[in-house]
Image: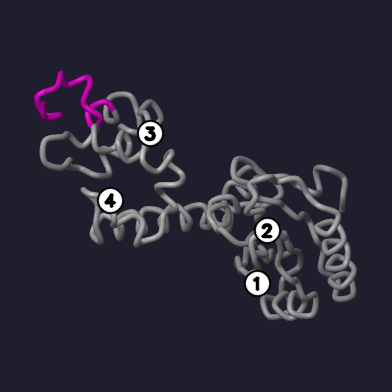
Amino acid sequence: MAITDWPEQERPREKLLQAGAQTLSDAELLAIFLRTGSKGISALDLARQLLQEFGGLRPLLTADRKEFCAVHGLGDAKYCQLQAVLEMAHRCLRESLQRDDALTSPEQTQQYLRLRLQSYPYEVFACLFLDNRHRVIAFEELFQGTIDGASVHPREVVRRTLHHNAAAVIFSHNHPSGVAEPSRADQHITLRLKDALALIDVRVLDHIIVGSENSVSLAERGLL
């Protein structure tokens, strides 16, 4: 049965309009994105199949082009739509941070960093450069590594900080293993960077470790 033949209160689009997007399941949200199903199945059934095949919403959203387009019912057009939606989410969060003090919006800051770094299969070290009111000037991915580490060079961090004329910074990197717990190496490089930036009167406000399900703040742990 096509979705248009369902009772109105059970159709994903109508349900969203009546009760809000937060009330929809992952499959219902994905069905609205897909818009149409494939031969013999509705968009909602296709969405359920995709979530089962990829193992959930996150693996689907972070799949590369080849993996995504190999699935029947998907293709380049839907891949482009998905990438556009994800990039709009990135930019929306970044604009919010640029308007607000990053320290008064810690959950929003961590949410933005998770969205940016969580999906990488290798380690990425990044930095939020902040002005003297702790608003975001820029976000940069500074170093890329392997599945279990990335080399971080304090001289380059100082150079990029001076380039942006930043007054403070928040560091972040992901753990591809999925476990967000900071290692001794994470703590060590944070203190090295803090000492280097202190020489140019720039404060390190936090270092946020991003895992697959959560993130950990070194500042909140008292490790700065």
User: Circle 4: is it few (<14), some (14-19), or many (20+) Cα within 10 Å?
Assistant: few
Amino acid type at circle 2 is His
Amino acid type at circle 4 is Val
Select label 1 or label 4 by which is in front. Answer: 4
**Pointer 2 or 3: first along the chain:** 3
Between the residue at mark 2 and the residue at mark 4, the CA separation in whole angstroms equals 31 Å
**Pointer 1 or 2: first along the chain:** 1
Between the residue at mark 2 and the residue at mark 3, the CA separation in whole angstroms equals 27 Å
> Considering only vertical position in the picture, is 69 above or below 159?
above
Residue beneath label 3, please? 26
Between the residue at mark 1 and the residue at mark 3, the CA separation in whole angstroms equals 33 Å
Quadrant containing the N terminus in the rendered view: top left
Amino acid type at circle 1 is Leu
Residue beneath label 4, please? 71
Select label 3 or label 4 by which is in front. Answer: 4
> Considering only vertical position in the picture, is 171 above or below 144?
above
Say which element carries label 1. Answer: strand
Marks 2 and 4 in Cβ contact (< 8 Å): no
